[in-house]
Amino acid sequence: MSNIHIIGPQAAGKTTYLAALAYQPETSRSPVRQANIKVKTLNEETRELVDKAENIIVEGASLEPTQKYVKTIDDLKVYSFLIEIKRKWQNLERLQLTVRDYPGEVFKELESGSRDPIHEEFMNECLSADTQGCLILLTEWEQGIDKFYKRAFRRFIALMDEQQRLQNLRLAIAMSKCERGELWPGRLDPESDLFAIHFPDTLRFLRDNIPPTNLEFYAISAFGVLGNKDPRPNRKEELGKKDRYSVLRDPEKWSPYCLVSPLYWLSTGKRIQGYV
Amino acid sequence: MGVVYIGDRATGKTHLALELTNPRHEHVKVTSPDYDQLKLLLLDENSMSKPTDTLKPYQRYLEMNVQLPSGNKRVELDWIDTGGEVWRGNWQRDNSDKWKDYIEPIRQSEGILLILPPHRGMTFQPGVDTQEFPTEQQWCNRFETWVTFFCDQCPQIRHLAICLNKADLFCDLSQEGKKLAYRPYNSPCNWQQRHEHVLKKYFRPVYSQIRRLGEGMSSPSVKCFITSIYHRGLLELPWIYLGSFLGK
């Protein structure tokens, strides 16, 4: 069983990502379905996530921020998945994952350097010896954000070093909400077409400090686009939220993009074929 | 933690909460407290709401089942009703200690139902005495103070449902009820579409303030509703919305 932790700024879509992964919308375009991958939920908290996807996301509303109900480390939910991959002429591959989703404030504090004892506890757990890897979701790309991300990663890497995880923790850095028009064309080679363009300093810093075998870049989208030949984002912004919160535009066309790939790599160290 | 009803005097907060417990339900069934007992407690002999006490927030345990797409969810809440008087500036100034008793449950609450009255700029049904209601300008000014209140005093609240009440006085209930209807499977519209419809049709004068409210609050969840005790479907909508988040 692999322990994976998800961190990222507030409203980066961490919980929505997990809800989409747990729910697996039944559309024929679903890359997961096409790749013969099945995602099964293994505990009550993950099944609650499926209910949230069905009752909230499909019904045209946004999930609430994790920070709203996480006051202590015990409030932090543990999601447990079984991912089954069936390939031609090969045995069924099974991956069991335990995923923790941290409030965005943890990432913010990495940048500011302040230390809330609860968030410190989160980070200690996140970098503990039994963690295989971290999925770090980034979402904004406006001017100046590169410096913000670099400062956060500098602190994160210092903490990795303190915990002696610098050489043995996989980091999957993902640009989330990639259904957005400006990002969608860059999804096929995110390292070159998203990270090198929007966060050159952060990218350089990560490459200089993390062994290449432990660092991968992804573009993911919990909502996806409207169709294979219709690249309009399947999202609609919430009023007054300036891109931070949006709702699913057409549930019938819900087809998430690249949800399993980063988790597969974090868990096994191998890349899965395609963008599932 | 609970769900708090707030709003000015005589906007129908208590009646709205009471009617939710009516056993003739659609998708929200209140299992406790009992409708008839509550009626005796909250209404006078003429079936009019007794004014809510301003000494302290009126708190009651409420248990309900909400039918959602994924199945029935149980929602257990502290239903907190506040007297309309407390929203007057001079009351707050004269009773600063008591005001603290009100503001804390609001800050701690999981959801807030802000109940608003109609205003005179609306097209009312024949026979309605429009003088009972604020002018459009007064209504907008009051809304502005609500926005300031939420952004300054409680930006961390989780869910805010803004309910324009007494919809029976200014719209065709059955038509709007049909348009906004909730069905656990195949609803004609989703929460965002309902919100946009109500926002454009009934909240146009305060559109920019609602945008500002969205910007000022950390949560994504500000939704507009129309409610009436004479239409069960519309009455239940804010609760189904809250139940989607709070249900277990």
Image (cartoon, coloured by chain):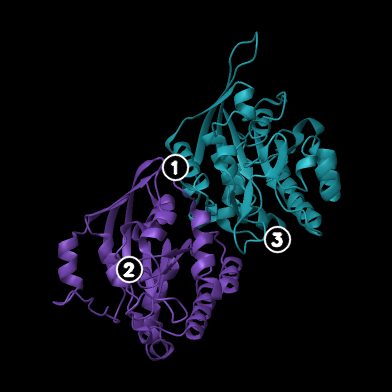
Chain colours: A cyan, B purple
| Residue at disc 3, secondary structure | helix
- Residue that carries the numbered disc 2 in the rendered image: B80
Label 3: how many Cα within 10 Å (few below 14, some 14–19, many 20+) = few
Name the residue carrying label 3. A112
Mark 3 and mark 1 in contact? Answer it, CB < 8 Å: no
Tell me the SS state at disc 2. Answer: strand
Residue B222 shows up from this direction: no
Amino acid under disc 2 = Ile
Residue pictured at 15% horizontal, 64% vertical = B37
Q: Residues within 10 Å of mark 1 (few under 14, many from 20)?
A: few
Q: Nearer the viewer, residue A8 or B125?
A: B125
- Chain on which label 2 sits: B
- Chain of residue at mark 1: B
Q: Nearer the viewer, residue B97 or B22?
A: B22
Q: Earlier in the sequence, mark 2 or mark 1?
A: 2
Label 2 vs label 3, nearer the camera: 2
Callout 3: chain: A
Q: Is residue B154 visible?
A: yes
Percent coordinates x, y for residue A222 in the rendering: 62, 41
Closest to the camera, between mark 3 and mark 1, is 1
C-alpha distance separating marks 3 and 1: 46 Å
Q: Which residue is mark 1?
A: B186
